[in-house]
Amino acid sequence: MANVAFIGLGNMGGPMATNLVKASHNVVVFDLAQVACDQLASAGASIAATAAEAVVGADYVISMLPAGKHVAGTYLGDTGLLAKLDIATTVLDCSTIDAATARTVGEAAATMNIGFMDAPVSGGVAAAAAGTLAFMCGGSAETFKKAEIILKDMGKNIFHAGPAGSGQVAKGCNNMLLAIQMIGTCEALEMGARNGLVPKVLSDIMLASSGRNWSLEVYNPYPGVMEAAPASHDYQPGFMVDLMVKDLGLAMEIAEQSGVKNVMGQLAQSLYMEYQSAGNGQQDFSGILQKLQD
Ligand code: NAD
């Protein structure tokens, strides 16, 4: 059992913190929204009045916040949490943020001898609730060993990607590839359907051929092919277009900062941004099929 401070109890952080309570850890929570704290209190966590109060005596500090500015504001500067932590504390930021901020926080933690990892997740709200998230971690090997102990109570696959910032880079690479694959899968299925092929039959052919990919295998974007997929439920998410656009923006930042010419990634970003601007931000990202059908 560990003492865990958990900061940011939204759609993802709420169920993740709940799983730590279920795993018998002593969890102290903080969120700017009182209602989010109250929900965790009814699950068995203690509520702190501030983030600084939550981290007193913590073995682990875990954060699940919206963006880089929230993470920098929480940890850095004279009033930030790093300045208040004991060197025995391990800090795990599970938010999806820009790699540059993750590196900055990692470097600041290193100068104070505090173990820090960026540990963004793959898997949405359902995986957070089921405790089956994948974690992509960036930090030292020593911190990763400590991180694994607690992350296994919230996830199934835990990877050490490299030094600080590497978790965010891995997530950017993965989600850019996912967007490209999803659009390609939609184009192939639509082309087949317009030429008289039944989408389920074409899907089976491609699944047994070299076009096989994750979108086709477990998340078919064509309505009616896969009963459990969002496509068969009016594209209710699932993984929202708004979040895909956010993640593609972060991936483009990584590409630009490292001088990578990612033509397909940029095209995927502009298609998803157009689809979002047409009022589809809250739809599942596989709904991009509808854009191709228009
Ligand atoms: P959310 O908006 O539901 O929750 C964010 C929470 O952080 C809110 O409760 C908010 O009150 C709290 N918060 C904001 N600033 C704070 C601060 N300074 N101190 C304390 N609390 C603060 O977001 P979410 O869907 O839970 O996503 C969290 C992170 O996980 C994001 O970076 C997102 O990109 C990533 N993510 C989300 C999903 C998903 O399916 N929702 C999947 C993978 C990754």
Image (cartoon, grey):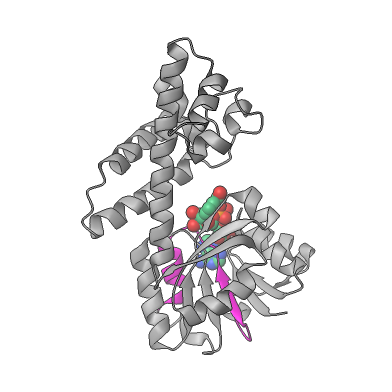
From this viewpoint, is residue 45 visible?
Answer: yes
Q: Quadrant of the C terminus?
A: top left
Q: Residue at x 42, y 25 (%)?
A: 188
**Residue 206 image point, x, y percent:** 48, 28
Q: As displayed, is residue 262 above or below residue 111?
A: above
| 35 or 246: nearer the viewer | 246
Q: Residue at x 54, y 42 (%)?
A: 239
| 37 or 256: nearer the viewer | 256
Q: In which quarter of the image is residue 232?
A: top right
Q: As displayed, is residue 76 above or below residue 281?
A: below
Q: In which quarter of the image is the N terminus?
A: bottom right
Q: What stretch is highlighted in magenta?
A: 55-76
Q: As displayed, is residue 241 above or below residue 58?
A: above
Q: Which residue is drawn at 39% across and 66% down?
A: 166
From this viewpoint, is residue 51 visible?
Answer: no
**Residue 231 image point, x, y percent:** 57, 28
Membership of 174 in magenta stretch: no
Left or right: 78, with 225 as reference point: left
**Residue 115 image point, x, y percent:** 48, 82
**Residue 164 image point, x, y percent:** 40, 72
Q: Which residue is drawn at 65% across and 48% down?
A: 126
Q: As displayed, is residue 154 above or below residue 223?
A: below
Quadrant for ligand 1 reads bottom right
Q: In which quarter of the image is residue 104?
A: bottom left
